[in-house]
C-alpha cells in the first residue's frame, strides 16, 4: 500500500512540473510575438499614411524641368499687355541688372492680384528662353503691307520670299495670330502678327517677309522667395 501511495505522489509531481513548464513556454512565445509586432508595422493603414506623407512632401516642392531655368529676383515692374499677357521686370541686385520677362497669367496658379502683391519682393521663378522670328516688314510686289507703320529698311534684316498662308481672317483676339511663309525650297518660317485686311488680301500670294531674331524669356512658375 505504501508502495502504491509513493508512486502516486511521483506521478502527481511530474504532472505539476509539466504544467508549469508549458505555461512558461507559452508566456515566452507570447512575449516573442509581442516583440515582433512592436518592431514591425503590421497595419496597412500605418503604411498608407507614410506613403501619403511622402507624396505630399514631393508635391509641395515643384522642381524645374530640363528646359526651365531657375532664378531669384525682385519684381520691380509689372506692365499690362494684351490679356492674358503681362511683362514682368525683374531686378538682380548682385548682378546689377534688370530683365523683362513675359508672363501668361493663365499658365500659372496665381492670379494677377497675387502677382501684384509680390511687387518689390524677392521671388523664386522658372522661365523658358527662346529665340523667335521677329517680323519687321511684309512686302508684296515690293510694296509694304504695313503702310505708315512700316519701319525704315535695314539691310541687316533677314528675309524669306514665298507663299503666304495662315492669314485667312483678321485677328479679333487680344493675342496675335500666326502666319507662315513657304519658299520654293520647302523652307517654312512662322511669324506672330496682328492680321489686318491688307494681310488677308495677300494670303495665298507671294510675299517677302523681313525679320530679325530676338530672345524671349517666358515665366512658367513663380513663388515668394525665401
Image (cartoon, rainbow, N blue to C red):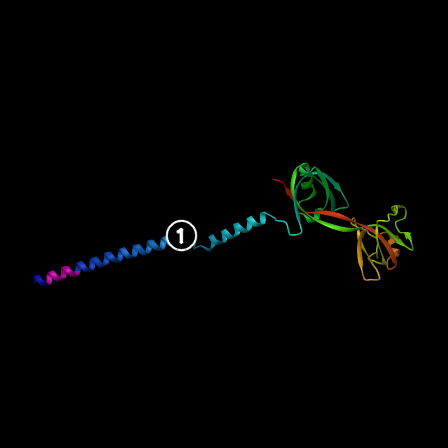
Q: Which residue is outermost to the front?
A: 156
- The picture places residue 21, in percent across and down from the top left corner, at 24, 57
* In the image: residue 61, left or right of residue 191: left
Q: Is residue 151 above or below residue 203?
A: above
* In the image: residue 58, left or right of residue 37: right
The residue tagged 1 is: 39
Majority secondary structure of magenta residues: helix
Local secondary structure at mark 1: helix
Tally of numbered tags: 1
Q: Which residue is outermost to the left?
A: 1
Q: Residue at x 17, y 59 (%)?
A: 12
Of 80 and 139, nearer the camera is: 139
Residue 98 magenta: no
- The picture places residue 23, in percent across and down from the top left corner, at 27, 56
Q: Residue at x 8, y 61 (%)?
A: 2
- The picture places residue 142, in percent across and down from the top left corner, at 91, 53
Residue 32 found in image quarter: bottom left
Of 154 and 122, nearer the camera is: 154
Residue stretch rendered in magenta on the structure? 4-11
Q: Residue at x 16, y 61 (%)?
A: 11
* In the image: residue 130, left or right of residue 33: right
Amino acid at each position: 500500500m505504501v508502495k502504491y501511495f509513493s508512486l502516486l505522489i511521483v506521478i502527481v509531481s511530474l504532472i505539476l512540473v509539466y504544467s508549469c513548464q508549458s505555461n512558461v513556454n507559452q508566456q515566452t512565445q507570447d512575449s516573442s510575438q509581442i516583440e515582433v509586432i512592436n518592431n514591425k508595422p503590421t497595419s496597412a493603414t500605418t503604411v498608407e499614411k507614410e506613403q501619403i506623407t511622402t507624396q505630399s512632401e514631393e508635391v509641395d516642392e515643384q522642381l524645374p524641368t530640363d528646359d526651365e531655368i531657375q532664378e531669384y529676383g525682385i519684381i520691380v515692374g509689372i506692365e499690362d499687355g494684351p490679356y492674358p499677357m503681362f511683362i514682368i521686370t525683374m531686378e538682380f541686385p548682385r548682378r546689377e541688372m534688370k530683365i523683362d520677362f513675359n508672363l501668361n497669367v493663365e499658365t500659372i496658379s496665381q492670379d494677377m492680384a497675387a502677382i501684384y502683391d509680390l511687387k518689390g519682393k524677392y521671388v523664386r521663378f522658372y522661365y523658358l528662353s527662346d529665340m523667335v522670328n521677329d517680323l519687321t516688314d511684309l512686302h508684296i510686289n515690293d510694296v509694304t503691307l504695313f503702310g505708315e507703320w512700316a519701319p525704315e529698311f535695314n539691310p541687316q534684316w533677314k528675309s524669306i520670299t514665298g507663299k503666304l498662308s495662315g492669314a485667312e481672317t483678321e485677328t479679333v483676339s487680344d493675342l496675335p495670330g500666326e502666319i507662315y511663309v513657304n519658299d520654293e525650297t520647302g523652307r517654312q518660317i512662322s511669324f506672330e502678327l496682328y492680321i489686318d485686311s491688307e494681310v488677308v488680301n495677300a494670303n495665298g500670294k507671294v510675299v517677302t517677309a523681313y525679320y530679325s531674331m530676338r530672345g524671349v524669356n517666358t515665366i512658367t512658375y513663380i513663388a515668394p522667395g525665401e
